[in-house]
């Protein structure tokens, strides 16, 4: 008799941690664990701003699945359909035809995607910050704008190149904004053609505060610190249009910019729409505190279906009537409880409820600057920056990644960050194609016959 198959959809915080724990708690005779994800690594998203800033190597902000999940089967592909009524998933591999896979238990953890709005021009010029590719592109793009501004004779192009707009005042937006402002300030030392006063960083936030995760007091402190650094904060303001780089804001201001970073929230993965699982009003999978998927109308458990993280609405038992926030703090802890619950069920036991009181948050605001509100304790400046770094290096999976990240930080401290753009990474074949004339099959045959 074959052991029960546990399929993990998505290898983010929940998927990786759950699969890793299950592979340690259950041997191959007790369960087969299959992890399905389109990319062969897990991205540690809290490190994306640091990767974009060049504080750490982009490769060290990701965790290779095959290296860490040695006892699991890794399937590089995308789940295009999930039918829990039949307990099957349809998988589209990187190459080749789609196929179905049966399962006994499934962990639905495809995570989230950027929550965008129907704003004219956003799809053409917006840059997200959810993947390591976007982090690399953002760094190269911003440094490339400095090169453009330094040589162009066109004053309008120069101004647009030196305007950097960030939309969204949560963790991702504030950390990316602060880190990239640090990078530009440091890079300007090598651009005598540019005056630092020409550079403008603008934050657009629809609410009346930033960093709500660290509380109103620390959020206000962050706003004051960013303003002192010359960053233009536009609170209670939203983006109306950005067609052809013409930024139009709800406060009536209008200007040109060639950089627009969009970090205004997330929404559950669209993959969930291709399932027969019960979804809440915001598109999240409906879960019980045990992390079992359940019917919204009756509360009946769908045996063998589990979910957690950004894509799931899990009741917050420490805040009756509320839901667990879509944060890495909950995702990592939910993954542990979820894996233990599946193990219990596979071995004939009963699952336990997930309960965790949000402890607060830490945010980096560039080199040697940070803010934290943890267990009611408020910390700012250099101590908060250290807390931010050591917390996240303790959370990234594997000793291998921890050592590499620490080494990157030490080297950046001793040798300073590199401030060079590698824009050719995004179009690596352009030069080769330019020097290689196209050859038609007919011409190819003629030339072959004359040899």
Image (tube, rainbow, N blue to C red):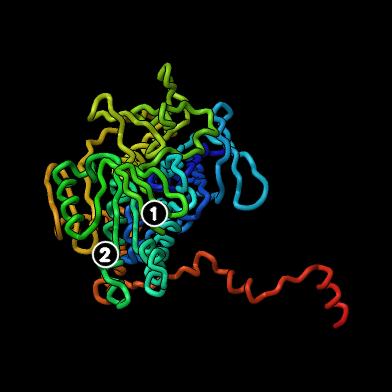
- At 31% from the left and 30% from the top, the residue drawn is 323
Residue 58 sits in quarter: bottom left
Quarter occupied by the C terminus: bottom right
Q: How far is mark 1 from mark 2, CA to CA? A: 17 Å
- At 29% from the left and 43% from the top, the residue drawn is 251
Mark 1 lies on residue: 260
Residue that extends furthest to the bottom in the rendered view of this protein:
451
Which element type, helix, strand or loop, lies under badge 1?
strand
Query: In the rendered structure, are the residues bearing label 1 and label 2 in contact, judged by CB atoms less than 8 Å apart?
Result: no
**Up-down: is 419 above or below 166?**
below
Picture coordinates of residue 87 (x, y %)?
A: 56, 31
Picture coordinates of residue 111 (x, y %)?
A: 42, 42
**Up-down: is 427 above or below 371?**
below
Q: Is 433 in front, or is 368?
A: 433
Left or right: 368 in relation to 293: left
Task: Say the numbered circle drawn on residue 406.
Answer: none
Mark 2 lies on residue: 182
Dot 1 surroundings within 10 Å: few (below 14), some, or many (20 or more)? many
Picture coordinates of residue 147 (x, y %)?
A: 40, 72
Counting residues from the N terminus, which is met first, the one under dot 1 or under dot 2? Answer: 2
- At 84% from the left and 69% from the top, the residue drawn is 442
């Amino acid at each position: 008799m074959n052991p029960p198959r546990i399929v993990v959809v998505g290898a983010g915080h929940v998927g990786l941690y759950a699969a890793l724990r299950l592979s340690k708690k259950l041997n191959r005779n007790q369960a087969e664990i299959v992890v399905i994800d389109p990319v062969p690594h897990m991205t540690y998203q809290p490190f994306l701003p640091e990767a974009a800033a060049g504080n750490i190597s982009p490769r060290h902000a990701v965790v290779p699945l095959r290296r860490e999940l040695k006892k699991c089967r890794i399937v590089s592909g995308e789940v295009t359909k999930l039918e829990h009524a039949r307990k099957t998933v349809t998988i589209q591999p990187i190459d080749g035809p789609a196929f179905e896979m049966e399962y006994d238990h499934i962990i639905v953890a495809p995570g989230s995607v950027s929550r965008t709005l129907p704003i004219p021009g956003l799809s053409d010029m917006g840059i997200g910050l959810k993947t390591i590719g976007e982090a690399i592109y953002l760094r190269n793009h911003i440094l490339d704008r400095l090169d453009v501004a330094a040589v162009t004779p066109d004053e309008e192009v120069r101004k647009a190149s030196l305007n950097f707009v960030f939309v969204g005042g949560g963790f991702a937006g504030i950390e990316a904004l602060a880190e990239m402002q640090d990078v530009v300030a440091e890079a300007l030392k090598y651009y005598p053609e540019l005056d630092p006063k020409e550079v403008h960083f603008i934050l657009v936030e629809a609410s009346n505060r930033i960093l709500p995760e660290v509380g109103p007091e620390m959020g206000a402190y962050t706003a004051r610190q960013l303003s002192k650094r010359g960053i233009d904060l536009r609170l209670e303001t939203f983006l109306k249009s950005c067609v052809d780089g013409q930024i139009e804001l709800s406060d009536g201001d209008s200007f040109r910019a060639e950089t627009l970073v969009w970090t205004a929230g997330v929404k559950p993965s669209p993959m969930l729409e291709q399932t027969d699982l019960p979804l809440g009003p915001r598109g999240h999978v409906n879960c019980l505190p045990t992390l079992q998927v359940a019917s919204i109308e009756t509360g009946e458990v769908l045996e063998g279906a589990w979910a957690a993280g950004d894509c799931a609405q899990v009741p917050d038992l420490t805040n009756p009537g509320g839901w667990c926030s879509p944060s890495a703090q909950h995702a990592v802890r939910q993954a542990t409880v979820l894996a233990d619950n599946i193990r219990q069920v596979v071995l004939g036991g009963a699952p336990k409820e997930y309960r965790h009181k949000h402890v607060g948050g830490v945010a980096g605001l560039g080199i040697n600057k940070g803010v934290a509100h943890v267990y009611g304790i408020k910390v700012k400046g250099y101590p908060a920056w250290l807390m931010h770094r050591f917390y996240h290096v303790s959370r990234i999976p594997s000793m291998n990644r921890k050592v590499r990240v620490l080494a990157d930080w030490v080297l950046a401290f001793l040798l300073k960050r590199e401030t060079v753009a590698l824009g050719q990474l995004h179009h690596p074949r352009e030069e080769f194609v330019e020097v290689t004339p196209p050859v038609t099959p007919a011409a190819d045959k003629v030339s072959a016959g004359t040899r």
